[in-house]
Amino acid sequence: MSNKSNKIVVAVTGASGAIYAQVLLQKLVLLQDQIQHIGVVMSHNAKEVWQYELGNNDFEKLPFTLYRKDDFYAPFASGSAGYNMMIVCPCSMGTLARIASGVSNDLTTRAADVMLKERKKLILVVRDTPYSLIHINNMKTITEAGGIICPASPSFYSRPKSFEELASTVVDRVLELSGLNISTYRWGEK
């Protein structure tokens, strides 16, 4: 029995790690029986990094609505639209800082602010390394406000054989944190 009550925002920032966003969006296509709507917002830098790192514009071919980063009329810019989760993947440290400070200067940071104020699920897939004390304090602030920090730290016990499989170890964790039902490698299961 499918539950199509999920309304999800996916934001892609200009942090390195476009493969995480690509794998996430591909997996969300396969999970549409659990999702009513997916809105995607990408920064200009996110598109450039995607093209540079992945060598394609496949984000233009996805079956989701792509919103401009300055489109404050997007439904998820307001809590009344009923979106219940947001995933920022990858999440740059600048975006993290703006969210932690409550600066809603674009659609990504506004939507994240909405998720926190409405007590909905906000998952930030941070990719930078190492972390400065400023980064750590911003992560602490977001965690205390109800957000989830999920570093893009892949696992290896599933023995991934490709970059996509390696990225999936992070993306599958994000999807499980979001509450979506997925089939994935689980430690201790055969």
Image: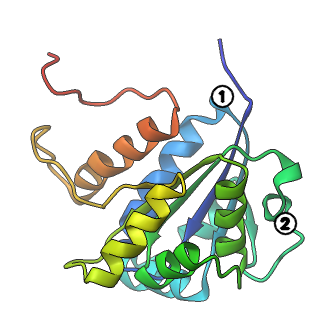
In front of the other: 152 or 111: 111
Q: Vertical placement of 126 versus 29: above or below?
A: below
Counting residues from the start of the chain, the first of labels 2 and 1 encountered is 1
For discs 2 and 1, the disc positioned in front in the rendered view: 2
The secondary structure type at the circle numbered 1 is helix
What scheme was used to colour the molecule?
Answer: rainbow
Residue located at (82% from left, 77% from top)? 71
Is residue 129 found left or right of 42 in the rendered image? left
In front of the other: 159 or 162: 159
Residue kind at label 2, given as amino acid type: Ala
In front of the other: 35 or 147: 147
Residue located at (45% from left, 71% from top)? 91
> The N terminus lies in which quarter of the figure?
top right
**Residue 180, how many percent across, how many down?**
52, 32
Is residue 68 found left or right of 143 in the rendered image? right
Does the residue at mark 2 contact the one at mark 1 (Cβ under 8 Å)? Answer: no
* Occupied quadrant, residue 52: bottom left
Dot label at residue 74: 2
* Occupied quadrant, residue 72: bottom right
**Residue 183, how many percent across, how many down?**
38, 26
* Occupied quadrant, residue 158: top left
Is residue 110 found left or right of 102 in the rendered image? right
Residue kind at label 1, given as amino acid type: Asp
Residue located at (47% from left, 57% from top)? 144
Label 1 belongs to which residue? 33
**Residue 188, how many percent across, how many down?**
12, 20
Is disc 2 surrounded by few (<14), some (14 to 19) or many (20+) residues within 10 Å? Answer: some
Q: Vertical placement of 69 versus 5: above or below?
A: below
Q: Residue furthest toward the top?
A: 1
